[in-house]
Amino acid sequence: METRQQAQARRIRPNRRSLTGSIPVKGRAVPFESSLERDLLVLLDFDEDVASVAAQPYTLSFAGPGGERRRYTPDFRVRRHSGPPTVYEVKYRQELRERWPDLKPRFRAAARDARQRGLRFEVVTEVEIRGPRLENARFLRPYLDRRPDAGTESRLLDAMTQLGTAKPGDILNTAFPEHASRSMALPSLWRLVALGRIAADLDAPLTMATPLRAVGEDGRP
């Protein structure tokens, strides 16, 4: 088995049949070849533990079932602040079912190669990618670009310390007894959630009925 390491093993070109493009991930433009790949990148960009993402990081050469030489290029390599890097293959479930006899040897070779190099290999589908966390990431991500309002955020954090766990409306009512200020403070509240300074279960839909939790000095709820 031979691995050829490159900055990007294969150039992603525009495709009329599928969505291609690039989005910023951790400060760098990362290309994608489908809307499902793009959605995974949205999740990775929102994940605080992700340090960097590389598209199509290398091409693996391996022997197929009949001894023929075959090649495989994974979709992404993700480096994290904690734990080993992960190599991802992104596929729709239907494609996995339809092409499994062809894909299985590739994935086995990729998993074996990853283990030998101290990496993890994962195949992810729309089931893992397109859930509430993705919708929450899309909703919260723009708030990270807002200019912080230190005074408003301080009052919201003080309210969280007092309440411990509360719904957004109760937090706003506690922080701003004056009704007129509450709606203006809501973007700051969502910004604090996006930053992780106020905790929420991001694997459930985020609404005005979502319980939010205070975060301690150690960064834990």
Image (cartoon, rainbow, N blue to C red):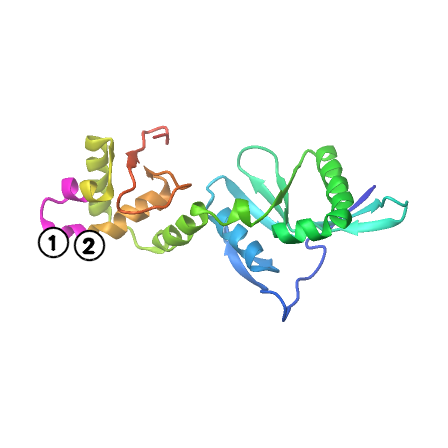
Crowd rating for badge 2 (residues with CA inside 10 Å; few <14, some 14–19, many 20+): few
Q: Nearer the viewer, residue 82 or 108?
A: 108
The CA span between labels 2 and 1 is: 8 Å
Report x, y in % for residue 64: 85, 46
Name the magenta segment's main secondary structure. Answer: helix
Which structural element holds mark 1? Answer: helix
Can see residue 29? no
Report x, y in % for residue 159: 19, 37
The quarter in which the N terminus is drawn is top right
Residue 143 in magenta? Answer: no
Examine the image and state in which quarter residue 219 appears.
top left
Q: What's the magenta region? A: 172-182
Label annotation for residue 184: 2
Report x, y in % for residue 96: 67, 49
Crowd rating for badge 1 (residues with CA inside 10 Å; few <14, some 14–19, many 20+): few
Report how many numbered discs are placed on residues in the image. Answer: 2
* Left or right placement of residue 24 versus residue 102 in this view: left
Residue hosting label 1: 180
For residue 221, above or below residue 178: above
Examine the image and state in which quarter residue 85 appears.
top right
* Left or right placement of residue 8 versus residue 52 in this view: right
Q: Nearer the viewer, residue 206 or 3?
A: 206
Give the residue at x 56% y 55%: 36
Can see residue 96? yes
Amino acid residing under circle 2: Met
Report x, y in % for residue 41: 53, 52
Which structural element holds mark 2? Answer: helix
Give the residue at x 19% y 31%: 162
Give the residue at x 18% y 44%: 172
Amino acid residing under circle 1: Ala
Q: Are marks 2 and 1 in contact (CB under 8 Å)?
A: yes
| Residue furthest bottom as drawn | 16
